[in-house]
Amino acid sequence: MRHSRRSVLTATAASAVALGVTAPPAQAASSGSGSRPPATAQPPSRELRALLKEIDPDRIEATVRKLVSFGTRHTLSVQDDPARGIGAARDWLLAELRSYAAESGGRMTVEAQSYIQEPASRIPTATRITNVVATLRGSVTPERVYVVSGHYDSRVTDVMDAVSDAPGADDDASGVAVALELARVMARRRPAATIVFAAVAGEEQGLYGSAYMAQQFKAAGADVQGMFTNDIVGSPTADDGVEDPYTIRLFAEGVPTSETPAQAATRRSVGGENDSPTRQLARFVRDTADNAATGMHVRMVYRRDRYLRGGDQIPFLERGYPAARFTEPAEDYAHQHQDVRVDETGKQYGDLPEFCDFAFVARVAKVNAAALWTLAQAPGTPRDTKIITSALTNSTQLTWTRGTEPDLAGYEVVWRETTAPEWTHVITAGDVTTHEADMSKDNVFFGVRAVNRAGERSPVAFPAPGA
């Protein structure tokens, strides 16, 4: 049987219905896939439900249209014109985020993270590249950091054309609008860990802004435990008109980009290709954001990114940080990286706001919010997690280091068959740093996650072999 894109998207929508997310009657009628939430799924807290209700599609639309109004936001465009070019967009983003920070009681700070990029690929002359970054400092474990971003630069067909109108509504005003809306609704709240909301530049020229931001975190020794980029999240409609309005793709690499030869040898020996920190982060998104509270199904894609493309998660992966990319379910390439024009058949090209679905973008923002807020409130991912391999035995002993969070309640051991994509079983271990399971480590995969007194769970840590 030949599977068309339409049949695949219909099956995905049916899976979303089975998982309990909102879907129109036509999709609900096609349900029956038998899918169900993973054993590790976490229901949203009352606090999170209240936060999600504040996400406003009208404000998201206003942000997208405002960014489009600057004509072009090409990285090489003018930076000192108050109405046109990337400099005007930068200044508006700074002002907007500072207005949110004013409501934070001093917990949120905003900076223009700027540097001079010397001539390089797609950068013909020395160019100032500026990321606009808002940091909401955690109230309990501020050293633990989570990042969400979109890129505010744009382009047309010729990547070096810094003059023509490049509206960049979907790519990537939509992702910036997600980051800004999360900053707005979270600014008045008190996350336990630190959340960073960023609009980065230089993406279309070569991920320059994100690389600079990731390197700044690395140089500071920051404990970045998760990063999400939202890039092309503006529309659920593919180039053939097929719509999948209740699904968002999440690209998550398996073999870590930053893997050392020694780590590669360990991975090959234990079969950990599907258990990188990024895959655990992606499973956490499914656990917390694939539900009726967001109205969305998170379709995990076991790849770093799409063919021939790359995004701002990659510089974070290169520096050893778990990072993943949100992208709409099926793209329409007539509305990205295209000159604004109408061809001889009357077809409109160009990345214009009329091709965005702002209710869809708001649901994508809810997915991000559910994952980020739970990450920030839950304990950090367990450290030094080991599976003891010093003796031949049919039982399995796991060890880890206890976290320092004041509300830490204990730990859970999770396991699954080696052929299963999701964790299928959860064992309560208690407030301990070791657990022995009466199961062979040769037959299944194990993991460990932390739990706080409010019942919020961390991402899973996959154990390395240890003595």
Image: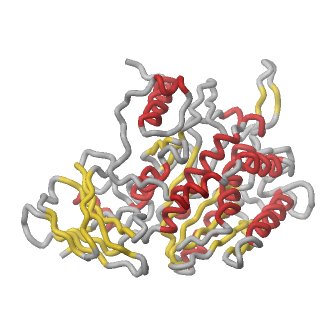
Q: Residue at x 55, y 58 (%)?
A: 48
Q: Is residue 218 above or below residue 169?
A: below
**Residue 89 in sight from this viewpoint:** yes
Number of marks in the image? 0
Q: Residue at x 50, y 29 (%)?
A: 9
Q: Can you give x and y, in whole percent of width and height, for residue 224 in the image? A: 51, 71
Q: Indicate left or right for 233 with 407 as reference.
A: right
Residue situated in front as seen by the camera: 13 or 408: 408
Q: How is the image coloured?
A: secondary structure
Res 256 quadrant in image: bottom left
> x%, y% of residue 367?
55, 50
Q: Is residue 232 above or below residue 33?
A: below
Image coordinates of residue 220 in percent, x first then y, are 56, 81
Q: Quadrant of the C terminus?
A: bottom left
Question: Which quarter shows the N terminus?
Answer: top left
Q: Is residue 258 found left or right of 116 in the rendered image?
A: left
- Which of 301/287 is in front? 287
Residue 251 horizontal/vertical position (percent): 49, 48
Near-viewer residue (465 or 174): 174
